[in-house]
Image (cartoon, rainbow, N blue to C red):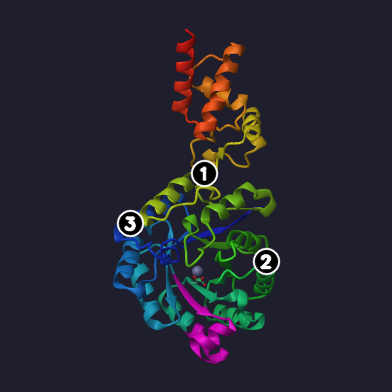
Amino acid sequence: MSRKIIVFDTTLRDGEQVPGAKLNLHQKIEIAQQLKRLHVDIIEAGFPASSLGDFQAVQEIARTVGDSVSITALARAVKNDIDAVYESIKLAQNPLIHIVLGTSNIHVEKKFNRSKEAVLQMGVDAVKYAKTLLPQVQYSTEDASRSDFEYLWSTIEAVVKAGATMINVPDTVGYAVPEEFGELIRKINDRMKNLNDKVILSVHCHNDLGLATANTLQAIKNGAEKVECTINGLGERAGNASLEEVVMGIKVRENYFNCHTEVNTSELLRTSRLVSHLTGLDVQVNKAITGENAFAHSSGIHQDGLLKDKRVYEIMSPEEVGVDSMELILTARSGRHAFKNAVEKMGFDTTDAADFEQLFEKFLTLADAKKEVYDHDVFYLVTSHRNLDA
Ligand code: KIV
Ligand code: ZN
Protein backbone atom coordinates (compact mmCIF):
# COMPACT_ATOMS: atom_id res chain seq x y z
CA MET A 1 0.00 0.00 0.00
CA SER A 2 1.21 3.51 -0.85
CA ARG A 3 2.69 5.27 2.23
CA LYS A 4 1.41 8.74 3.11
CA ILE A 5 4.21 11.32 3.36
CA ILE A 6 3.56 14.10 5.86
CA VAL A 7 4.22 17.54 4.35
CA PHE A 8 5.57 20.14 6.77
CA ASP A 9 5.78 23.66 5.38
CA THR A 10 8.36 26.04 6.86
CA THR A 11 7.92 28.99 4.48
CA LEU A 12 6.93 31.20 7.42
CA ARG A 13 9.97 30.21 9.50
CA ASP A 14 12.98 29.04 7.44
CA GLY A 15 11.57 30.75 4.32
CA GLU A 16 11.13 34.02 6.14
CA GLN A 17 14.82 33.98 7.13
CA VAL A 18 15.66 35.06 3.55
CA PRO A 19 17.10 38.59 3.53
CA GLY A 20 14.49 41.00 2.25
CA ALA A 21 11.59 38.58 2.74
CA LYS A 22 10.08 40.19 5.82
CA LEU A 23 6.34 39.70 5.96
CA ASN A 24 3.85 41.60 8.10
CA LEU A 25 1.19 39.94 10.26
CA HIS A 26 -1.55 40.26 7.66
CA GLN A 27 0.67 38.78 4.92
CA LYS A 28 1.71 35.85 7.12
CA ILE A 29 -1.92 35.03 7.83
CA GLU A 30 -2.73 35.21 4.11
CA ILE A 31 0.08 32.74 3.37
CA ALA A 32 -1.00 30.43 6.20
CA GLN A 33 -4.58 30.43 4.88
CA GLN A 34 -3.32 29.51 1.42
CA LEU A 35 -1.12 26.73 2.89
CA LYS A 36 -4.25 25.36 4.54
CA ARG A 37 -6.04 25.43 1.16
CA LEU A 38 -3.03 23.65 -0.33
CA HIS A 39 -3.63 20.99 2.31
CA VAL A 40 -0.19 20.73 3.89
CA ASP A 41 -0.19 18.68 7.10
CA ILE A 42 1.88 20.96 9.35
CA ILE A 43 2.65 24.69 9.17
CA GLU A 44 5.74 25.98 10.96
CA ALA A 45 4.52 29.49 11.64
CA GLY A 46 7.66 31.13 13.01
CA PHE A 47 10.23 31.42 15.78
CA PRO A 48 8.24 33.10 18.57
CA ALA A 49 11.13 33.73 20.95
CA SER A 50 12.87 35.85 18.31
CA SER A 51 10.56 38.89 18.57
CA LEU A 52 7.18 40.03 19.81
CA GLY A 53 6.03 40.40 16.19
CA ASP A 54 6.89 36.79 15.44
CA PHE A 55 5.20 35.62 18.63
CA GLN A 56 2.00 37.48 17.72
CA ALA A 57 2.04 36.16 14.15
CA VAL A 58 2.38 32.56 15.32
CA GLN A 59 -0.39 33.09 17.86
CA GLU A 60 -2.74 34.59 15.28
CA ILE A 61 -2.02 31.80 12.78
CA ALA A 62 -2.66 29.15 15.45
CA ARG A 63 -5.96 30.86 16.30
CA THR A 64 -7.17 31.43 12.74
CA VAL A 65 -5.92 28.44 10.73
CA GLY A 66 -5.04 25.94 13.43
CA ASP A 67 -8.43 24.20 13.35
CA SER A 68 -7.64 21.66 10.63
CA VAL A 69 -3.88 21.91 10.10
CA SER A 70 -1.25 21.19 12.73
CA ILE A 71 0.69 24.28 13.84
CA THR A 72 4.24 24.34 15.12
CA ALA A 73 6.95 26.89 15.85
CA LEU A 74 10.66 26.67 16.55
CA ALA A 75 12.44 26.70 19.90
CA ARG A 76 16.09 26.30 20.83
CA ALA A 77 16.62 23.77 23.61
CA VAL A 78 15.96 26.32 26.35
CA LYS A 79 12.98 26.86 28.61
CA ASN A 80 12.18 30.44 27.49
CA ASP A 81 11.98 29.45 23.83
CA ILE A 82 9.83 26.41 24.60
CA ASP A 83 7.49 28.53 26.72
CA ALA A 84 7.18 31.07 23.89
CA VAL A 85 6.30 28.28 21.44
CA TYR A 86 3.76 26.77 23.80
CA GLU A 87 2.07 30.10 24.56
CA SER A 88 1.85 30.99 20.86
CA ILE A 89 0.51 27.67 19.50
CA LYS A 90 -1.64 26.37 22.35
CA LEU A 91 -4.91 27.50 20.72
CA ALA A 92 -4.38 25.27 17.69
CA GLN A 93 -6.23 21.94 17.56
CA ASN A 94 -3.06 19.97 16.99
CA PRO A 95 -0.06 21.94 18.29
CA LEU A 96 3.50 20.63 18.04
CA ILE A 97 6.61 21.97 19.79
CA HIS A 98 9.70 21.95 17.58
CA ILE A 99 13.08 21.89 19.37
CA VAL A 100 16.42 22.24 17.56
CA LEU A 101 19.89 21.44 18.88
CA GLY A 102 23.11 20.66 17.01
CA THR A 103 24.73 17.23 16.93
CA SER A 104 27.83 17.77 14.77
CA ASN A 105 31.25 18.17 16.39
CA ILE A 106 31.54 21.69 15.02
CA HIS A 107 28.24 22.69 16.65
CA VAL A 108 29.04 21.00 19.95
CA GLU A 109 32.57 22.41 20.18
CA LYS A 110 32.30 25.83 18.53
CA LYS A 111 28.68 26.85 19.07
CA PHE A 112 28.11 25.45 22.55
CA ASN A 113 31.66 24.92 23.81
CA ARG A 114 30.42 22.04 25.97
CA SER A 115 31.01 18.32 26.11
CA LYS A 116 28.94 16.04 23.88
CA GLU A 117 27.30 14.55 26.97
CA ALA A 118 26.29 17.99 28.24
CA VAL A 119 24.76 18.95 24.90
CA LEU A 120 22.87 15.66 24.73
CA GLN A 121 21.55 16.26 28.25
CA MET A 122 20.37 19.76 27.23
CA GLY A 123 18.31 18.12 24.48
CA VAL A 124 16.84 15.52 26.80
CA ASP A 125 15.93 18.15 29.41
CA ALA A 126 14.32 20.33 26.75
CA VAL A 127 12.18 17.46 25.46
CA LYS A 128 11.16 16.45 28.98
CA TYR A 129 10.12 20.02 29.70
CA ALA A 130 8.22 20.37 26.40
CA LYS A 131 6.37 17.12 27.16
CA THR A 132 4.98 18.67 30.36
CA LEU A 133 3.26 21.21 28.10
CA LEU A 134 2.16 19.23 25.02
CA PRO A 135 2.09 15.61 23.85
CA GLN A 136 3.62 16.29 20.39
CA VAL A 137 7.31 17.25 20.31
CA GLN A 138 9.63 17.26 17.31
CA TYR A 139 13.40 17.17 17.88
CA SER A 140 15.74 18.40 15.12
CA THR A 141 19.32 17.17 15.23
CA GLU A 142 20.80 20.25 13.57
CA ASP A 143 23.67 19.58 11.14
CA ALA A 144 22.86 15.85 11.30
CA SER A 145 24.47 15.13 7.92
CA ARG A 146 27.88 16.27 9.26
CA SER A 147 27.52 14.51 12.61
CA ASP A 148 29.32 11.48 13.94
CA PHE A 149 26.73 8.73 13.39
CA GLU A 150 27.01 7.04 16.79
CA TYR A 151 26.62 10.36 18.63
CA LEU A 152 23.70 11.29 16.39
CA TRP A 153 22.09 7.96 17.16
CA SER A 154 22.66 8.28 20.94
CA THR A 155 20.96 11.66 20.78
CA ILE A 156 17.99 10.27 18.86
CA GLU A 157 17.65 7.33 21.24
CA ALA A 158 17.83 9.58 24.31
CA VAL A 159 15.36 12.22 23.11
CA VAL A 160 12.88 9.55 21.99
CA LYS A 161 13.13 8.01 25.46
CA ALA A 162 12.48 11.49 26.88
CA GLY A 163 9.28 11.69 24.80
CA ALA A 164 10.06 13.15 21.35
CA THR A 165 7.40 12.01 18.88
CA MET A 166 9.13 13.16 15.67
CA ILE A 167 12.82 13.06 14.81
CA ASN A 168 13.86 15.51 12.13
CA VAL A 169 17.20 14.95 10.39
CA PRO A 170 18.40 18.19 8.80
CA ASP A 171 21.05 18.66 6.16
CA THR A 172 21.47 22.12 7.63
CA VAL A 173 24.22 23.39 5.34
CA GLY A 174 23.20 21.50 2.19
CA TYR A 175 26.35 19.37 2.31
CA ALA A 176 24.89 15.90 1.71
CA VAL A 177 24.62 14.15 -1.64
CA PRO A 178 21.64 11.90 -2.40
CA GLU A 179 23.13 8.42 -2.06
CA GLU A 180 24.91 9.30 1.18
CA PHE A 181 21.86 11.08 2.67
CA GLY A 182 19.61 8.17 1.70
CA GLU A 183 22.00 5.79 3.44
CA LEU A 184 21.96 7.94 6.59
CA ILE A 185 18.16 7.84 6.67
CA ARG A 186 18.12 4.09 6.02
CA LYS A 187 20.47 3.48 8.97
CA ILE A 188 18.43 5.67 11.31
CA ASN A 189 15.17 4.12 10.13
CA ASP A 190 16.51 0.58 10.67
CA ARG A 191 17.55 1.38 14.23
CA MET A 192 14.33 3.25 14.96
CA LYS A 193 12.37 0.09 14.21
CA ASN A 194 13.89 -1.43 17.36
CA LEU A 195 12.75 1.40 19.63
CA ASN A 196 9.72 0.81 21.82
CA ASP A 197 8.00 4.02 20.77
CA LYS A 198 6.57 4.74 17.32
CA VAL A 199 8.35 7.89 16.18
CA ILE A 200 8.00 9.74 12.87
CA LEU A 201 11.22 10.13 10.89
CA SER A 202 11.51 13.44 9.06
CA VAL A 203 14.03 15.25 6.84
CA HIS A 204 14.88 18.90 6.25
CA CYS A 205 17.23 19.63 3.35
CA HIS A 206 18.98 22.82 2.29
CA ASN A 207 19.93 23.62 -1.27
CA ASP A 208 23.53 24.87 -1.10
CA LEU A 209 24.62 22.36 -3.75
CA GLY A 210 21.27 22.40 -5.57
CA LEU A 211 20.47 18.95 -4.14
CA ALA A 212 17.70 19.67 -1.62
CA THR A 213 14.90 18.09 -3.66
CA ALA A 214 17.05 15.11 -4.69
CA ASN A 215 18.16 14.51 -1.09
CA THR A 216 14.58 14.74 0.17
CA LEU A 217 13.31 12.26 -2.42
CA GLN A 218 16.20 9.90 -1.70
CA ALA A 219 15.32 10.09 2.01
CA ILE A 220 11.72 9.11 1.22
CA LYS A 221 12.99 6.15 -0.77
CA ASN A 222 14.93 5.11 2.34
CA GLY A 223 12.11 5.36 4.85
CA ALA A 224 11.51 9.04 5.73
CA GLU A 225 7.85 9.62 6.51
CA LYS A 226 7.82 13.38 6.69
CA VAL A 227 9.41 16.12 4.58
CA GLU A 228 10.10 19.73 5.48
CA CYS A 229 9.90 22.15 2.55
CA THR A 230 9.14 25.73 1.60
CA ILE A 231 7.16 27.32 -1.20
CA ASN A 232 9.45 28.39 -4.05
CA GLY A 233 12.33 26.76 -2.14
CA LEU A 234 12.76 29.93 -0.05
CA GLY A 235 15.04 29.64 2.97
CA GLU A 236 18.40 30.36 4.54
CA ARG A 237 21.15 31.01 1.90
CA ALA A 238 20.33 28.92 -1.22
CA GLY A 239 17.04 27.90 0.36
CA ASN A 240 15.23 24.73 1.36
CA ALA A 241 13.75 21.84 -0.58
CA SER A 242 10.99 23.29 -2.70
CA LEU A 243 7.56 21.97 -1.68
CA GLU A 244 6.20 22.03 -5.22
CA GLU A 245 9.15 19.99 -6.53
CA VAL A 246 9.06 17.39 -3.75
CA VAL A 247 5.29 16.99 -3.89
CA MET A 248 5.18 16.68 -7.69
CA GLY A 249 8.21 14.36 -7.63
CA ILE A 250 6.26 12.04 -5.35
CA LYS A 251 3.09 12.39 -7.45
CA VAL A 252 4.57 12.00 -10.93
CA ARG A 253 6.76 9.07 -9.80
CA GLU A 254 4.22 7.53 -7.41
CA ASN A 255 4.90 4.02 -8.67
CA TYR A 256 8.62 4.44 -8.07
CA PHE A 257 8.32 5.85 -4.55
CA ASN A 258 5.15 3.96 -3.63
CA CYS A 259 4.12 7.04 -1.63
CA HIS A 260 1.63 9.86 -1.83
CA THR A 261 0.87 13.17 -0.12
CA GLU A 262 -2.48 14.80 0.56
CA VAL A 263 -1.43 18.12 -0.97
CA ASN A 264 -4.01 19.64 -3.32
CA THR A 265 -1.56 20.12 -6.18
CA SER A 266 -3.95 22.28 -8.21
CA GLU A 267 -3.25 25.02 -5.61
CA LEU A 268 0.54 24.92 -6.16
CA LEU A 269 0.81 27.69 -8.72
CA ARG A 270 -1.52 30.01 -6.82
CA THR A 271 0.51 29.44 -3.62
CA SER A 272 3.81 30.04 -5.39
CA ARG A 273 2.53 33.29 -6.95
CA LEU A 274 1.12 34.51 -3.63
CA VAL A 275 4.38 33.87 -1.76
CA SER A 276 6.38 35.52 -4.54
CA HIS A 277 4.08 38.53 -4.59
CA LEU A 278 4.06 39.02 -0.80
CA THR A 279 7.78 38.43 -0.26
CA GLY A 280 8.77 40.42 -3.35
CA LEU A 281 11.03 37.52 -4.40
CA ASP A 282 10.66 36.49 -8.03
CA VAL A 283 10.42 32.86 -9.11
CA GLN A 284 13.06 32.12 -11.74
CA VAL A 285 11.42 31.62 -15.14
CA ASN A 286 12.75 28.09 -15.61
CA LYS A 287 11.95 26.96 -12.04
CA ALA A 288 10.54 23.43 -12.03
CA ILE A 289 6.74 23.20 -11.59
CA THR A 290 5.93 26.89 -11.00
CA GLY A 291 8.34 28.87 -13.18
CA GLU A 292 6.79 30.86 -16.01
CA ASN A 293 8.34 28.52 -18.59
CA ALA A 294 7.66 25.26 -16.75
CA PHE A 295 4.92 24.34 -19.24
CA ALA A 296 5.94 26.52 -22.21
CA HIS A 297 7.25 24.76 -25.29
CA SER A 298 9.08 26.71 -27.94
CA SER A 299 10.95 24.20 -30.12
CA GLY A 300 9.18 23.32 -33.34
CA ILE A 301 9.95 19.62 -32.93
CA HIS A 302 8.45 19.64 -29.45
CA GLN A 303 5.41 21.68 -30.48
CA ASP A 304 4.70 19.28 -33.33
CA GLY A 305 4.97 16.29 -30.98
CA LEU A 306 2.74 17.90 -28.34
CA LEU A 307 0.05 18.70 -30.84
CA LYS A 308 -0.02 15.02 -31.82
CA ASP A 309 -0.14 13.81 -28.22
CA LYS A 310 0.68 15.88 -25.11
CA ARG A 311 2.40 12.92 -23.46
CA VAL A 312 5.18 13.07 -26.07
CA TYR A 313 6.84 15.95 -24.16
CA GLU A 314 4.77 16.32 -20.97
CA ILE A 315 5.33 14.29 -17.79
CA MET A 316 2.52 16.03 -15.88
CA SER A 317 -0.39 18.11 -17.02
CA PRO A 318 -0.21 21.86 -16.32
CA GLU A 319 -3.75 21.68 -14.92
CA GLU A 320 -2.52 19.34 -12.17
CA VAL A 321 -0.46 22.16 -10.64
CA GLY A 322 -2.99 24.88 -11.35
CA VAL A 323 -1.67 26.15 -14.70
CA ASP A 324 -4.51 26.68 -17.22
CA SER A 325 -2.94 24.68 -20.06
CA MET A 326 0.36 24.11 -21.82
CA GLU A 327 1.68 27.13 -23.66
CA LEU A 328 3.20 26.98 -27.11
CA ILE A 329 5.50 29.97 -27.61
CA LEU A 330 5.72 30.71 -31.31
CA THR A 331 9.26 31.45 -32.45
CA ALA A 332 11.19 31.12 -35.71
CA ARG A 333 11.81 27.52 -34.65
CA SER A 334 8.10 26.71 -34.46
CA GLY A 335 7.07 24.54 -37.34
CA ARG A 336 4.00 24.71 -39.61
CA HIS A 337 2.03 22.47 -37.25
CA ALA A 338 2.25 24.85 -34.27
CA PHE A 339 1.62 27.93 -36.41
CA LYS A 340 -1.39 26.30 -38.06
CA ASN A 341 -2.74 25.36 -34.63
CA ALA A 342 -2.45 29.00 -33.46
CA VAL A 343 -4.17 30.34 -36.61
CA GLU A 344 -7.01 27.84 -36.38
CA LYS A 345 -7.46 28.47 -32.63
CA MET A 346 -8.36 32.05 -33.61
CA GLY A 347 -11.04 30.79 -35.94
CA PHE A 348 -9.23 31.34 -39.27
CA ASP A 349 -9.43 28.84 -42.08
CA THR A 350 -6.19 27.18 -43.25
CA THR A 351 -7.47 24.84 -45.95
CA ASP A 352 -5.99 26.85 -48.85
CA ALA A 353 -2.48 25.34 -48.88
CA ALA A 354 -0.89 28.05 -51.06
CA ASP A 355 -2.35 30.81 -48.90
CA PHE A 356 -1.16 29.08 -45.76
CA GLU A 357 2.39 28.79 -47.18
CA GLN A 358 2.49 32.54 -47.85
CA LEU A 359 1.21 33.18 -44.34
CA PHE A 360 3.83 30.88 -42.87
CA GLU A 361 6.63 32.71 -44.77
CA LYS A 362 5.38 36.02 -43.33
CA PHE A 363 5.25 34.46 -39.87
CA LEU A 364 8.90 33.33 -40.16
CA THR A 365 9.99 36.85 -41.16
CA LEU A 366 8.11 38.32 -38.21
CA ALA A 367 9.46 35.67 -35.82
CA ASP A 368 13.04 36.38 -36.95
CA ALA A 369 12.53 40.05 -36.20
CA LYS A 370 10.48 39.74 -33.00
CA LYS A 371 11.86 36.49 -31.52
CA GLU A 372 8.55 35.63 -29.85
CA VAL A 373 5.21 35.84 -31.60
CA TYR A 374 2.07 36.27 -29.52
CA ASP A 375 -1.61 35.71 -30.28
CA HIS A 376 -2.22 39.36 -31.17
CA ASP A 377 0.72 39.20 -33.65
CA VAL A 378 -0.79 36.15 -35.33
CA PHE A 379 -4.16 37.85 -35.51
CA TYR A 380 -2.67 40.94 -37.15
CA LEU A 381 -0.60 38.82 -39.51
CA VAL A 382 -3.59 36.87 -40.79
CA THR A 383 -5.98 39.81 -41.10
CA SER A 384 -3.47 42.07 -42.86
CA HIS A 385 -2.34 39.25 -45.16
CA ARG A 386 -5.89 38.47 -46.21
CA ASN A 387 -6.91 42.08 -46.62
CA LEU A 388 -3.91 42.67 -48.90
CA ASP A 389 -4.86 39.69 -50.99
CA ALA A 390 -8.50 40.66 -51.13
O1 KIV B 1 18.35 23.86 8.77
C1 KIV B 1 18.07 23.47 9.93
O2 KIV B 1 18.79 22.67 10.53
C2 KIV B 1 16.87 24.00 10.53
C3 KIV B 1 16.37 23.34 11.78
C4 KIV B 1 15.70 24.31 12.67
C5 KIV B 1 15.46 22.21 11.41
O3 KIV B 1 16.24 24.88 9.98
ZN1 ZN C 1 16.70 24.94 7.83
Tell me where residue 62 appears, x and y as whole percent. 36, 62
Q: What residue type is labelled 2?
A: Gly
Q: Which residue is drawn at 57% across and 13% down?
A: 355
Q: Is residue 194 magenta?
A: no
Image side of residue 64 versus residue 94, left or right: left
Bin the neighbour count of mark 1 within 10 Å (Cα to Cα): few under 14, some 14-19, many 20 and up.
Answer: some
Q: Magenta residues, as a range? A: 97-125
In terms of depth relative to the viewer, which is nearer, 197 or 72?
72
Q: How far apart are marks 2 and 3 (CA)?
A: 36 Å
> Residues at badges 2 and 3 in contact (C-beta under 8 Å)?
no
Q: What residue type is labelled 3?
A: Gln
In terms of depth relative to the viewer, which is nearer, 338 or 121?
338
Of pointers 1 and 3, the one earlier in the residue sequence: 3
Tally the numbered discs. Answer: 3
Q: Which residue is drawn at 57% across and 17% down?
A: 358
Of pointers 1 and 2, the one earlier in the residue sequence: 2
- Which residue position is annotated with label 3? 27
